[in-house]
């Protein structure tokens, strides 16, 4: 098939998947509350055809169009192709969708392109992974991932105490399959995905091999149970809630209740050398290319949004306001420079696969702070205007329209409708239920900032030479 349309994607979701929403098991394709979000998610597939020159490439095996996010990059030119794809896809939601399928595609392609990581163990597992990669290309499948152990008791290590019992692990092995049980958190897009891909985030220790699993199963597999958080998509007009009306990518907690995983879908089973090497090999330079480009596109939008907010109030020249606008632009420029620098210094990271330089990971550490600050700036600039904004239907009434044009216009000659559009978009971006969820996503979707900071320090110690203080004191004769 390759490069699906929205219609083909939606047809694939009409199956027996077990999804719980508000205390009821629901059929995602028939659930009225999910209609807007499904339209938004499926629109991704039409978008990739609309912008085929950016989003699609020719599959060298089948000769059919495939998503550029699924290529295994072998050169800087390939990375430039991927860059255009990520950028174009991010513009579909201006970065408000974190888990458009290009995200997991990038992880999967990265793993498929790194057989050297699997060479520490039995290469048949990597053959399984490569076959799965082909399946995803040919079906243009939508993947969710669950990579975090469902640790509840934070006073003990993640796989100790009560956590040991509730986390996903192998419960039995058979000649043709393994059986797994336990929980994982969480699956963004899970209810709207075709496959649930389980792979490592943090390393695990010797003795914990039963948790060292990488596999993928269709979301509809018996025993895969998804419990949705409240749905924040709203049945509203696009012009009133441009994000909430379409872009709730729906997170779910996942329970695997005796799920059978056929051998051919197992990519790691207990080999810690391979398991612990995957995340460092494919996250920093590879996945971060997609996430950083999405973030840059979102910062572009946020900057323009804040300029519009300032214009609507004629505060664009006020010193405090211009500083805040400059601050967002600074975050954008730093992000662009980090991407550019990492892409320019891309190298063969193993097995002939090119990834941007892994120091792109620094974007992951600082972006959560910047995204929070952006929302803070929107609140600071927007104040009550973010709320005191009429529903766009109000303008349909001639009398009300006249009154609003008189008493609620924007400054600088801006019409009341334009003013309302700007503030409604701003609130949906940062303050609505969906906006708040996206803020939490930015904070935590790739581990907490504290973990990132600690990781950056360990990287610094491992990759650079230190001793400046002693050197200075020696040179200056102070020692
Ligand atoms: C909206 C959303 C969507 C997500 N989607 C997915 C998904 O699709 N798939 C998936 O697998 N996961 C997903 N996640 C989960 C995400 O990966 C985890 O929430 C994230 O890794 C943080 O979880 P944690 O509890 O492991 O964080 P931890 O790093 O354990 O942090 C927990 C808390 O402790 C603090 N903390 C941690 N270490 C320290 C320290 N040394 N000192 C002080 N404080 C510290 C952190 O700041 C945080 O407040 C999503 C999360 C969110 C919020």
Image (cartoon, rainbow, N blue to C red):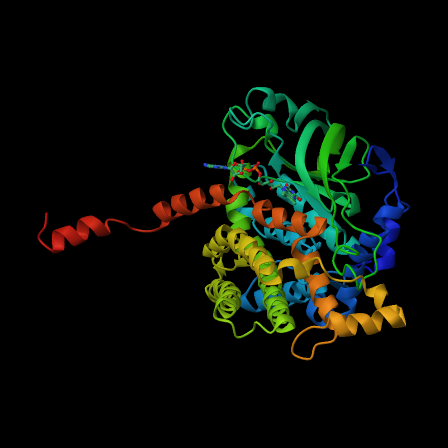
Residue 437, relative to residue 26: is it above or below? below
Q: How many marks?
A: 0
**Which of the pair 451/180 is nearer the observer?**
451
The answer to whether any part of residue 349 appears in the image is no
Residue 118 as seen in the image, left or right of residue 422? left
**Which of the pair 423/438 is nearer the observer?**
423
The residue lying furthest to the bottom in this view is 413
Image point 49% across, 58% down: which residue?
A: 348
> Which quarter of the picture shows residue 374?
bottom right
Residue 421 as seen in the image, left or right of residue 361? right
Image point 67% across, 47% down: which residue?
A: 437
The answer to whether any part of residue 273 appears in the image is yes
Picture coordinates of residue 368, whole percent (x, y): 54, 51
Image point 18% across, 52% down: which residue?
A: 471
Picture coordinates of residue 351, whole percent (x, y): 53, 53
Picture coordinates of residue 456, whole percent (x, y): 42, 47
Q: In which of the image's four quarters is ligand 1 placed? A: top right
Residue 457, relative to residue 88: is it above or below? above
The residue lying furthest to the top in this view is 161
Residue 310, relative to residue 16: is it above or below? below
Picture coordinates of residue 253, whole percent (x, y): 71, 36
> Which quarter of the picture shows residue 416?
bottom right
The residue lying furthest to the right in this view is 30
Image point 55% across, 65% down: which residue?
A: 75
Q: Looking at the figure, which quarter contains the N terminus?
A: bottom right
Residue 249, relative to residue 215: is it above or below? below
């Amino acid at each position: 098939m390759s490069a699906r349309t929205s219609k083909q994607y939606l047809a694939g979701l009409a199956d027996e998947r077990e999804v719980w929403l508000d205390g009821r098991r629901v059929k995602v394709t028939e659930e009225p509350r999910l209609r807007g979000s499904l339209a938004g998610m499926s629109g991704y597939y039409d978008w990739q055809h609309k912008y085929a020159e950016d989003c699609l490439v020719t599959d060298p095996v089948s000769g059919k169009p495939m998503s550029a996010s699924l290529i295994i990059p072998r050169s800087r030119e390939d990375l430039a192709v991927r860059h255009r794809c990520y950028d174009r896809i991010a513009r579909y939601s201006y970065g408000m969708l974190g888990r458009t399928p290009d995200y997991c595609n990038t992880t999967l392609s990265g793993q498929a392109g790194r057989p050297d990581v699997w060479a520490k163990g039995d290469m048949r597992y990597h053959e399984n992974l490569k076959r799965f990669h082909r399946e995803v290309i040919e079906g243009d499948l939508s993947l969710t991932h669950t990579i975090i152990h469902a640790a509840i008791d934070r006073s003990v290590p993640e796989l100790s105490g009560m956590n040991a019992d509730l986390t996903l692990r192998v419960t039995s092995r058979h000649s043709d399959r393994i059986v797994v049980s336990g929980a994982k958190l969480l699956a963004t897009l899970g209810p709207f995905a075709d496959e649930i891909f389980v792979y490592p985030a943090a390393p695990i220790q010797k003795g914990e091999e039963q948790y060292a699993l990488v596999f993928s199963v269709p979301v509809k597999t018996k025993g895969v149970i998804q419990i949705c958080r409240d749905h924040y998509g709203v049945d509203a007009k696009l012009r009133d809630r441009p994000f909430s009306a379409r872009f709730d990518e729906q997170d779910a907690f996942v329970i695997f209740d005796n799920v059978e995983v056929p051998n051919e879908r197992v990519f790691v089973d207990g080999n810690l050398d391979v398991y612990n090497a995957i995340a460092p090999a494919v996250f920093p330079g590879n996945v971060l290319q997609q996430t950083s480009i999405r973030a840059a596109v979102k910062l572009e939008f946020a900057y323009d949004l804040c300029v519009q907010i300032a214009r609507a109030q004629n505060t664009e020249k006020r010193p405090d306001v211009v500083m805040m606008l400059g601050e967002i632009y600074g975050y954008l420029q730093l992000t662009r420079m980090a991407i550019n620098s990492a892409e320019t210094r891309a190298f063969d990271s193993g097995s002939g696969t090119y990834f941007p330089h892994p120091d792109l990971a620094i974007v992951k550490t600082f972006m959560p702070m910047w995204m929070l600050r952006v929302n803070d700036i929107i609140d600071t600039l927007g104040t009550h205007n973010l709320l005191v904004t009429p529903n766009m239907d109000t303008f349909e009434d001639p009398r009300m329209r006249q009154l609003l044009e008189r008493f609620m216009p924007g400054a600088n000659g801006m019409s009341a409708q334009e003013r309302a559009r700007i503030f409604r978009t701003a609130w949906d971006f940062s303050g609505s239920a969906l906006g708040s969820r996206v803020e939490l996503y930015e904070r935590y979707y790739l581990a907490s900032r504290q973990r990132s900071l600690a990781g950056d320090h360990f990287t610094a110690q491992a990759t650079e030479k230190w001793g400046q203080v002693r050197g200075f004191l020696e040179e200056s004769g102070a020692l």
